[in-house]
Amino acid sequence: MSIQENNQLLRFTTAGSVDDGKSTLIGRLLYDSKSIFEDQIEAVKTSSEKKGFDYVDLSLLTDGLKSEREQGITIDVAYRYFATPKRKFIIADTPGHIQYTRNMVTGASTANLAIILIDARKGLLEQTYRHSFIASLLKIPHLMVCVNKMDLVDYSEEVYNKIVSDYQAFSSKMDIKDVQFVPISALKGDNVVERSENMPWYEGSTLLYHLENVHIASDFNHVDCRFPVQMVIRPHTLENQDFRGYAGRIDGGIFKPGDEVTVLPSGFNSKVKTVELNGEQIDEAYAPMSVTMTLEDEIDISRGDMIVRRNNQPKVDQDLEVMVCWMNQRPLHNRTKLVLKHTTKEAQAMVKAIQYKVDVNTLHRIEDVDEIKMNDIARVSIRSAQPMFFDSYRKNRLTGSLILVDPNTNETVGAGMII
């Protein structure tokens, strides 16, 4: 079983300013890749006629909420699923407005790739900078910049080249490794699924071709072995009286029977006896597979413990430095008590200090802040009641991320990336 075979699902997020055509682009992808039903097409045609349009408004395919359809904008994160013979896709269609920054962080947190839309007539806007910064903060491995509405600038190569050079100058300041550009018209379909005859000067691939072929197998950390235990399996049946398995998702590295491992926090050593997937023993398992593991020794292990390699261990500490996106209407202050959830572990925690807030439009730091408001992104110091086992978010997006929960209301109030 190769790593490639199991990685045929690509998660991507779309971001751009309001009215840049994100919903139309997703509608076009679904429509041209034949991923929608006839009755859905009919409903969209009827709605388009009612609105007096002389074309089929494909954005109506994705704007699910009634208030979105009426205003013609996206408010919540809408997840869409489609597939081609080459790959399966999950799209997170995230809103463009500044007051929905938290929705964008939610939609982008698990993405392999982000599509940043730019209106060819307007060029780079404040939203472009903000969304690109969030994409780099969330360490999304691949970025696809789609210069949309090329039909409205007469498919001008000059306009496209200027936007590309402007974006390259800006993105060089950020930590983004793989950036690709494509000129498109979501409304007319140019370079989305089919190559455009209107832009013979563009020699690159179409958007769908890139989505189908971008290499995502190495997006996960296959070096540092991390297995947070989600559940201990004790069947207590006659044939499996002594069975003790540990189920969970591998958050990093590759595990094989015979590997020497250490269990945190106890520090006991053992060896992997078997690795099972869907009840069958397999030779190796890697991130992000969900498996059941057995060890050769009887060790007291419970949910929240972590199985790691003996000579490659995560950081173990109660003090964490975290970039937090605050998601609650009540602001966050120093000394606020919260519940911290990290992998399968949960602990009481307290905010020790707010270091600075980031102005997501200019990327400047705002110091001397005593509270963080909704949709703010800030660096905070947190102390947890128990030691956590973590890596930096830069090294591993799964063991480097956490969420903060209000202990009184049980609401998720913040999402964090460990520095």
Image: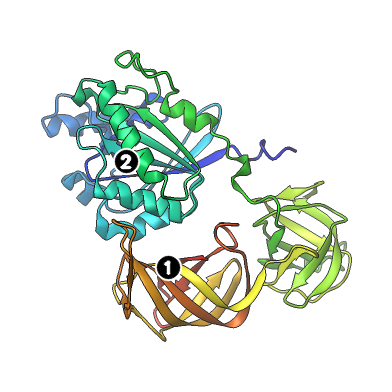
Q: To which quarter of the image does residue 105 belong?
A: bottom left
Q: Position of residue 357 (x, y in %)?
A: 35, 69
Q: Which secondary structure lies at badge 2?
A: loop
Decide if residue 256 is on the left or right side of residue 24: right
Q: Is residue 195 above or below residue 381?
A: above
Q: Is residue 190 visible?
A: yes
Q: Which label number is shown at residue 23? A: none
Q: Which residue is mark 1?
A: 324
Q: Please give the name of the residue rendered at 25% of the width and 21% of the height, measured from the top-left corner.
A: 156
Q: Which amino acid type is marked by label 2?
A: Thr
Q: Nearer the viewer, residue 352 or 375?
A: 352
Decide if residue 221 is on the left or right side of residue 156: right
Q: Which amino acid type is marked by label 1?
A: Val
> Closer to us: mark 2 or mark 1?
1
Q: Please give the name of the residue rendered at 25% of the width and 53% of the height, measured from the top-left corner.
A: 97
Say how the picture is coloured.
rainbow
Q: Nearer the viewer, residue 19 or 23?
A: 19
Q: Which secondary structure lies at badge 1?
A: strand
Q: To which quarter of the image does residue 258 belong?
A: bottom right
